[in-house]
């Protein structure tokens, strides 16, 4: 789990979010590289 701002890499944040999502949960994203990471 992320413990500080310095550890907050987008890939890690998304990994942690996905670990906690339920099967019916939805993640929304704007435009940028993180949009591609969410789509994977």
Image (tube, rainbow, N blue to C red):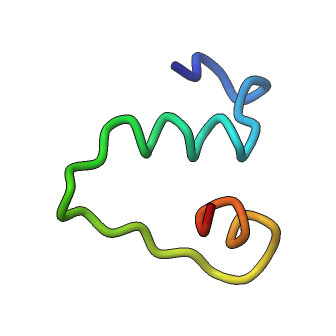
Q: Is residue 12 above or below residue 27?
A: above
Q: Is residue 20 above or below residue 31?
A: above
Q: Is residue 7 above or below residue 9?
A: above
Image coordinates of residue 23 in percent, x first then y, are: 21, 56
Q: Is residue 21 above or below residue 26?
A: above
| Residue in the picture at 31% in, 38% down | 20
Q: Quadrant of residue 36?
A: bottom right
Quadrant the C terminus occupies: bottom right
Number of numbered discs overlaid on the protein picture: 0
Left or right side of 7 for 22: left
Image coordinates of residue 22 in percent, x first then y, are: 21, 50
| Residue in the picture at 57% in, 46% down | 14
The front one of 14 and 23 is: 23
Which residue extends farthest front? 40
Q: Quadrant of residue 17?
A: top left
| Residue in the picture at 76% in, 37% down | 9
Left or right side of 27 for 14: right
Left or right side of 2 for 17: left
Image coordinates of residue 21 in percent, x first then y, are: 29, 47
| Residue in the picture at 24% in, 62% down | 25
Left or right side of 5 for 27: left
């Amino acid at each position: 789990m992320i413990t500080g701002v310095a550890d907050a890499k987008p890939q890690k944040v998304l990994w942690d979010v996905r670990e906690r999502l339920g099967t019916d949960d939805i993640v929304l994203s704007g435009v940028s590289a993180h949009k591609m990471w969410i789509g994977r």
